[in-house]
Amino acid sequence: MPFSTLGLSNALTEAIAGLNYTKPYPIQKEAIPVILKGKDMLGIARTGSGKTAGFVLPILEMFQHYKPEAKNRFIKVLVLVPSRELAVQVEEVFQSLASRLPRRVKTLAVYGGVSINPQMMKLHGIEILVATPGRLLDLVSSNAVKLSEVGTLVLDEADKMLNLGFKDEMDRIFALLPSRRQNLLFSATLSNDVIAIKELLLRKPEIIRIDEEDLDIDLIKQLAYYTDETRKGPLLRYLIKTAEMKQVLVFVSSVLRSDNVANKLNINGIKATTFHSGRSQGGRTEALAKFKSGEIRVLVATDLASRGLDIQFLPFVINYELPRSPKDYIHRIGRTGRAESPGMAISLISPEDIHHFKVIQKKMGRHVNILETSELDLKGY
Ligand code: AMP
């Protein structure tokens, strides 16, 4: 089924072709027609499912039919996101499509952790704003943005926004919006808090649930190595070196372990950095940028990175330590094998992990081979 059957005009389908998207992902197939009709919707889908283009495309389509307005500061579309990283990613999708369209639409991402003034300067003529809640409220209180004419509200990764404690900020933002508007709510999980937001905001919503986790898993080759805790470090370096892995996301269970593992990798000549809550926003963004560009080979991360990181064609994910919940395991390995490119997920399993790893396999409905490594000579790694 091509994109053109979803109600998008030629301008949009040509812009999509420019991104080399050949056919819509399931969430896009379902969401685009609903959003084009102006309906409210709840999408249960996570990053990696293609949900961003699922709302960006119909929003840009709607803009093709609006006259540009001279009214400054009154944004028309507000996309609320939990993190700076996601703000930048979403804005990139808007930009890359909008730049290919006849009716230009000005978009901007604003987020905390950086100086507010440059963002204020860039707000002139902005119609679509992607924002983290705190920074948006700062901009509103200094009169740089007006929310009274928002026609479409998107809450992206609502569960994460709530988990990060943004509930109060979100409520304050909702109170500033006009009552007549379209509401699009996206969340990877349906917690009680998300349900409360759905009840509060959405009017007769269409509910779209994409069971992406199963879908992804078949794209991912999974493998495990049985090892003593003490040999994990050398084994990790052995695997990275012998398989000549160029880009690896390594998951660990704590900030401290993340720093230690990255340190040891660097000492052994494998360029690595960390991504965790102990680092500043700026540090995290820089780490991610260097990892994406290939300047750094290994990103050692906590579960902060298991959701919401958009890295295309990530070939390897290694669980240096298993996450506690099987759901998080699936989110972690879902960082690979996305966008139709097969990836590999490797887990290092110590004797204490065996039982838990069985639980994970059972929950996921897939068997993973565990290879013995005691014979492996890891000297020099
Ligand atoms: P998202 O879930 O929005 O973060 O998207 C995940 C990844 O899928 C991004 O890297 C997109 O560029 C890519 N993507 C989204 N839609 C399509 C599509 N229809 N065809 C190919 N790639 C896509």
Image: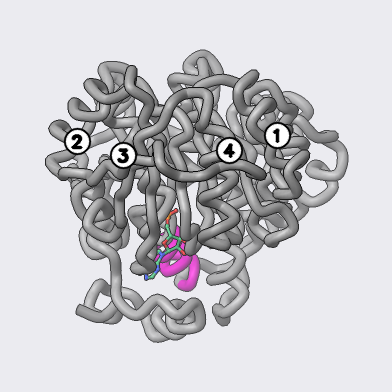
- Residue 26: name its quadrant: bottom left
Q: Earlier in the sequence, mark 2 or mark 1?
A: 1
Real-space CA distance between mark 2 and mark 3, rounded to the nearest whole angstrom: 10 Å
Q: Earlier in the sequence, mark 4 or mark 1?
A: 4
Q: Position of residue 133 (x, y in %)?
A: 59, 28
Helix, strand or loop for disc 4: helix
Real-space CA distance between mark 4 and mark 1, rounded to the nearest whole angstrom: 9 Å
Name which residue lies at 39% across and 81% down: 13
Q: Earlier in the sequence, mark 4 or mark 3?
A: 4
Q: Label 2, on which residue?
A: 361
- Three-letter code, disc 1: Lys
- The answer to which of 314 and 131 lies nearer the viewer is 314
Q: Earlier in the sequence, mark 1 or mark 3?
A: 1
Q: Is residue 373 visible?
A: yes
Residue 264 badge: 1
Q: Are marks 2 and 4 in contact (CB under 8 Å)?
A: no
